Image (spheres, grey):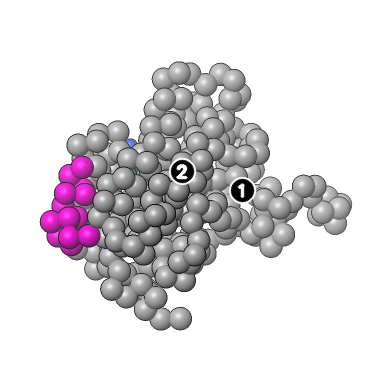
Amino acid sequence: MRDVMKGKRGLVMGVANDHSIAWGIAKVLAGQGAELAFTYQGEGMAKRVRPLAAGLGASLVLPCDVEDLASVDEVFRRLKDAWGGIDFLVHAVAFSDKSELKGRYADTTRENFSRTMVISCFSFTEVAKRAAALMNAGGAMITLTYGGSTRVMPNYNVMGVAKAALEASVRYLAADYGPAGVRVNAISAGPVRTLAGAGIADARLMFNYQKRHAPLRRTVTIEEVGGSALYLLSDLSLGVTGEIHFVDSGYNIISMPHPDVLKT
Ligand code: NAD
């Protein structure tokens, strides 16, 4: 398969470093001919993201903190000026206070609940609106979610609630933008060792548990997430919208771990 994304331009939000899921997606998209723009969260991230983006030939690398709507507006103004329109959007942004990614969900504070929801859920709705305004029929967007949205994962807590709302947003946005021919989907990735992933208490335990019990008996790579993103953002999936697509080595289908694994 070659040049599946040739002639397509899009924005990738959420690269922090070369372990980021967004980076795995960006590499695959660029490898298939896509032209990319990147955002980074504040100057602290710039020194890592700028060289990575340059390595993929990105022409636009812009600061954007989704808590600051003016910075979001500025990104889309710059994209419109530079390209006129875009073909795809990758939203791989999430945050919650680390002190609440442990212990009980019941102890979540109102302040962190709101902040987690705005950054990890509502930012997709805000960004999608601005992206859709720059898209023609055939445009596509994805966000990143996790199975802690529908089943309880220890310590994932408020982030699970935000991901549930994010997944519902994907369905509503798919319905809103579908008539214009713009598709909205999510990838539900299995655990990956990233900055955000490391914020969850006992992340290593969770990682190893899923590795042991998933049907494929391994976790997923960021490049594998990229492969599925390529499908969802390209014309290979023109009939697909509103989907939550699992890229988790099949972990989500398991009810009880296999006795062979439990015996070892
Ligand atoms: P990461 O730390 O590499 O990426 C998270 C990104 O969110 C960073 O680039 C960070 O700058 C950005 N971000 C946080 N707050 C922001 C703000 N206010 N404004 C703009 N950007 C902000 O970690 P990752 O694991 O690659 O996370 C990407 C997405 O994948 C997240 O939505 C995460 O929940 C999701 N996800 C991660 C895993 C995992 O195990 N790592 C599994 C499933 C889904």
Q: Residues within 10 Å of mark 1 (few under 14, many from 20)?
A: some
How far across and down, in percent of the image, does residue 164 sit? Answer: 54, 38
Please, what is the three-letter code of the amino acid marked with disc 1? Phe
Q: Mark 1 points at which residue?
A: 207
207 lies left or right of 123: right
Quarter of the rendering containing residue 235 = bottom left
Which portion, as a residue range, is magenta?
73-85
Q: Residue 172 carries which label?
A: 2
Residue 171 visible to an observer of this rendering: yes
> What residue is rendered at 86% in x and 53% in y?
259
Decide: is 88 above or below 197. below
- Count of all numbered marks drawn on residues in the image: 2
Q: Residues within 10 Å of mark 2 (few under 14, many from 20)?
A: some
Looking at mark 1, is its residue's CB closer than 8 Å to ligand 1? yes
Vertical placement of residue 244 versus 35, above or below: above
User: In this orientation, which residue lies closer to the viewer: 191 or 205?
Assistant: 191
